[in-house]
Amino acid sequence: MEKRHCHPSSLHNSSPQEFLSSATKLNLNVKSSKRTLKSLIHSIPSSSPLSSSLLPSLHTFISDSILSFRNPTSPHPSKKRRRSGRKNNTDEEATPSLHKQQQHNLEKLHLLAHVAFLCVSHPQKVFSPRDLLPSVQLLHDNLVFFESDSSLLLEISNLCEVYWRENLQGREMLISQSLPFLVSRSLTLKKKVDVHRVYALREAFTLFDFEDESIEDLKMLLIRTVIAPIYLKTEDGRKFLGFIFGLSMQLMKEALAMIKSQIAFGRKSILEAYGVVLFRAWKGVDGVLKEEFEGGFLQGLIEGSIYANSRVFAASVRRVLGGFVSQRITDGVEKLLFRLAEPVIFRSLQVANSNVRLNALHLLLDFFPLEDPDAMKEVKDTLLEKQFFLMERLIMDDCPDVRVVAVEGCFRVLHLFWEIIPSSTITKLLTKIFDDMSHDICNEVRLSTVNGTIYLLGNPQSHEILKVLLPRFGHLILDSALSSRAAVLDLLLLIRDIRSFQFNKVVGLDVLLSTLANDHSQVAQKITRLLIPSYFPSKVSIEEACNRCVTLIKRSPMAGARFCEFAMLEGASPKSLMELVRVLIGLVLSNEKLHADQIEGLLIAAASLCNNLVSEPCYKNALKEFFTGGKVKCLFAAASTGHAQPSVLNICSVVSPDDVAGLVEECMSLVTNCCGLPKNVEMQAKVRSAHRLLLSYSGFDDMFDSLTRLLQKAAYRCHVKFGVEIPKQRVSPGKRKKCKSSVKFSAKRKHVGGKNSTTFEYDYSIAVGIACQIKDLVVSKDSREAILGSQALESSFLALKVISEVSIEHCISCEYMDTSPVLAYSGLALHMSLQNISVSTNDSGSKNSEGTDSSSILEASCTFLFFHICFIEVSSL
């Protein structure tokens, strides 16, 4: 049959059958075809014969297509089925043909459904929806058979949706199949637009009889929406969920049971969404449904939040109840909360179980003030007084967790309801907290007092009384818990910016400086932030700022040094800090009479500033240029205290000035004369600084060679005294490569010891000091890499092995034996095994040389570590 092209000009001359036959040959996947079809149908005037004749023909076409789809004809109807093997071949040939025919029918139905949609949405309403209804109903009733074609399903659901949305006659006959499809589609595709469509059709769900078993599938779909994230996250989804609770008692019970089962596992956002859904559901139901909702479900939630064994579960339930608490100004909500909570909450606050008291307290704070809005004022005041009495009692509870929540809750209540609370009650509560709870034995309680005060300061009405009470918190700056000390600093930082407060009246300046000098870096940095407007302000000239900082260092040298350590982190400009370095170094080199601790503070401060400034190349170059002309040598001469000298070495390590040859010699002498190092903390700081300087000036290999020779000497003395075998190396020391250093070292070495230098005890103590150094050096990445790459590694390792064996074997008979060689050997062996470094030895008495691989080294390390533990146990006896 020749294809007839449909144009607007030829519509009046076409029969409905011809028109529909031509239309079914279009491809809806092509946008131009859709536009053409829409133009053709929407251009039909009411005077056209097609306005009355098209719909009956459309119904016939749809009916025939559905019949053909549901009862496809066999491609070979005349052929008789055989039992031979050719039967399978015939069926296999028939199956593609059947599938092709089925697909053709689906495409045809899709186009016919689209024609129906265009007819019902005609702008001039040319086609009667009542006449079109049989065709639409036929498509709707067979919707379940088209599940293989999602586009056809969507087309039919769109058609049904138009009937419902425009309130067309017979719309109630088009929902039994289309609504389940739309709900299922929204759950499968998880798109907001589908959820919106379901919500727009919500009134259609009221036509179903949910007590009828025939719609069990729809009920299951609706129950699934209760736990579907797409419904809980979208506004329309939450509105729809609130709506379905009013459809039937059984559906409401099942939905509530589903929500209750999810509370224990829900995230914060999901629980809050449930709170919103439940509140909307409560508003939407009435009669028996509301009684069941309140007396059954909500009452159970409140009791569950109080008697829950898990605090996490109790908190989750309260988060769901928050949907009602946040809407308590809505008519009826406050009355509801009071009616459900009052019978159980006050009794639960006084039971013996501390967990129940804690949960009940949380709930009381969420519901506060718990009152009957219809009661007389005297009754309300009495009930409010009862709540404050119980809160004051719980502040002194035996359980620390209850006390923490009670303190925080009191501050929260005072912050939010200051105006309605009698002043005598406010004074009584705050006095008890500041006088008693700030001295509580539990750190969390003390911390809650400070954090609660910070929160309460957000209410300006509290400032007058807090101005009197805050000095009672001063002792907490010396609290044993770091968290409490840090919280006090947060409090001081807050009141510093409130005009009517003075932070130094809460904590004195001397106490602050002492804490700054000695406390944890977290606390010290906050004190620096607190003091920087006073001692290094940005609003004054650089000269004035430097003078103030110098004044601070002179007053409290170590506090001033820590202040400089954190000044850049707290916003001080690098330019002004560079000038401060010049001022501090100039002051040390001047003829001004300074105490040794002041010089120490100035140098430590300068070292901290240099360490921060060198991160920017321009300032590193400026510092390198500044430390010329013998300044370093003069600074080291002025540094007479134990902490001052490492500061000079640290400055040199980070700045790398050129004229430090003499200083490098001092460092070499310092690391080699290390008798008594493990017990001398001040000396350890010097040695670490010397390591950094030698590493930065490429003198590390020379240093490690010197230390190795001293270890070998001690190992030889162990051999002589105790007869321990010394492993011989395959590679002679003379073949080692010499390291090129950036500075020249003199051949002389300072060596202190006198007559004691000839004793075994002295040589062993030097070896212990060197072992202590190696133990520290393998911790740092740069120094560890330098050791593992050193030519002297093998010699030092074998010497440490000998010394460790002697230390373990003779720890009982010789009191001066130390654990440091064992720790150093174990640590070095571990890192060598990780780097797969082996050691070559030639044991005396054997003919063949054998190497010790990394696995053997690791095994030896574990063995020595075991003996080290035994060594400690024996030494402690």
Image (spheres, rainbow, N blue to C red):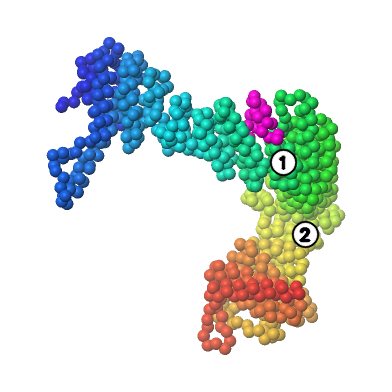
Q: Position of residue 814 (x, y in %)?
A: 75, 80
Q: Is residue 300 above or below residue 661?
A: above
Q: Is residue 43 above or below residue 488?
A: above
Badge 1 amino acid: Ser
User: Mark 1 = which residue?
Assistant: 348
Classed neighbour count for the residue bearing mark 2: other residues with Cα under 10 Å, few (<14), some (14–19), many (≥20):
many
Residue at 81%, 53% in the rendered image: 557
Q: Is residue 783 left or right of residue 354?
A: left
Residue at 27%, 23% in the rendered image: 59
Q: CA distance from mark 2 to mark 1?
A: 63 Å
User: Mark 2 = which residue?
Assistant: 644
Q: Main secondary structure of the magenta part?
A: helix
Q: Is residue 269 above or below residue 733?
A: above
Specify the segment rendered in magenta.
321-343
Residue at 26%, 36% in the rendered image: 103
- Magenta stretch encompasses residue 464: no
2 or 1: mark nearer the eye = 1
Seen from the viewer's position, the closer of residues 304 and 821 is 304
- Quadrant of residue 340 in the image? top right
Q: Is residue 185 left or right of residue 40?
A: right
Q: Is residue 797 left or right of residue 639?
A: left
Residue at 27%, 11% in the rendered image: 47
- Quadrant of residue 765 in the image? bottom right
Q: Position of residue 258 (x, y in %)?
A: 53, 39
Is residue 552 shown to the viewer in this render? no
- Magenta stretch encompasses residue 342: yes
The answer to whether the residue labelled 2 contacts the one labelled 1, judged by CB atoms less than 8 Å apart, is no
